Amino acid sequence: MGVVTCYNVTKMYRRHRAINQLSVNFKEQTITGLIGRNGAGKTSLLKMIAGLTRPTSGDLEVFGEHPFNSLKVSANSIFVDDQMVLPPDLTVSKVLRECQNFYPNWDKVLADRLINYFSISLDVYPDQLSKGKRSTFHAIIGMASRVPLTIFDEPTTGMDYSVRQDFYRALLKDYLEHPRTVILSSHLLNELEDLLEEIILINDGGLKLHESMADLKEYAIGLIGQSSVIWEQINEEQVIYRKNMGSEQSYIVVKNDLSSELKTSLHRSGVQLKPVSPADLCVYITNQSKGGIDDVFDRDES
């Protein structure tokens, strides 16, 4: 049983189905990446988990309770995004003081050190901070709160690359010292491979993949070579993604369950076998078709 369990969860906004009969569990004391393209349903799912909205149908439990209007869930979780609502009449320093009063496990030393490291002024109001600084401030609150369930929804919005890397490293170091359940949504999976333990990939509100990061790295294999040679030896059903690389060459991604004999045969036929990164794999799986953008420009001239 996970900290968060979803069974056939659906979320409707008028006629739009943001989450579609989603069944998935988020493990306890694990950093899980909720990955998906913009509009995949990540924010809708996380807001339901945080108790900010309720499902249209299905069963959603957090800490064994329905999260909407749950005091237990509110007291033991935090939802962090770039629109995080803070009292508009409080400066950064006063917001930190109120956080210390509200969160029993608040780490003042960590918060103060991070505020100083990221050069965030204590005397300004949060809405006076730049977009990147404001996202950083919100992320600091999420880390220093030390609640059992921490939800980061695209927390690095507006941060430049170096700040994002510092945030990821700070989160990992603090998590290793104080394990808790962390859910982090993002579409920048290439930056998170060293941080995440589990990956949940959703698209159009439905579950596409739930794997450990270690298994995801071995999930698929890329084949590069003469198209006719590859297609003679693999089945269309195995294909996750394909791209033409000239009149006779192709790049074809298949699930990495090929037999050793088939891999040897492909290699002897001049086909290169290449690993597929988790970030690229998630893009390929959520493509509307098995082809890429180049297919838009391929025209039948006959």
Image (cartoon, rainbow, N blue to C red):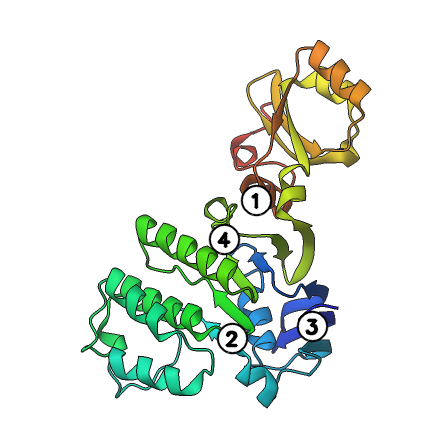
x and y, in percent, of residue 77 in the image: 54, 77
Q: Name the residue at 51% across, 58% down.
A: 176
Frontmost of labels 4 and 3 is: 4
Residue at 45% over, 71% down:
80
Q: Name the side, left or right, on which 85 lies relative to 6.
A: left
Res 147 label = 2
* Residue 51 vs residue 174, the one in the foreground: 174
Image coords of residue 154 (percent x, y) = 45, 62
Identity of the amino acid at label 3?
Answer: Thr
CB-based contact (under 8 Å), mark 1 and mark 4: no
Among numbered discs 4 and 3, the one appearing first in the sequence: 3
- Out of 153 and 123, give the one closest to the viewer: 123
On the rendered structure, is 220 left or right of 192?
right
The answer to the question of whether label 3 and label 1 lie on touching residues, with beta carbons closer than 8 A, is: no
Marks 2/1: CA–CA distance? 32 Å
| Residue wearing tag 1 | 283
Q: Amino acid at mark 1?
A: Val
Q: From the image, tell me which residue sits under label 4.
A: 187
Separation of marks 2 and 4 at Cα, in angstroms: 24 Å
Q: Secondary structure at mark 2?
A: loop
Q: Amino acid at mark 4?
A: His
Q: Earlier in the sequence, mark 2 or mark 3?
A: 3
* Numbered disc 1: secondary structure: helix
Dot 2 or dot 1, earlier in sequence: 2
Answer few, some or many: residues within 10 Å of disc 1's Cα (few below 14, many 20 plus, some between 14 and 19). Answer: some
Residue 232: quarter of image: top right
**Mark 2: which amino acid?**
Val
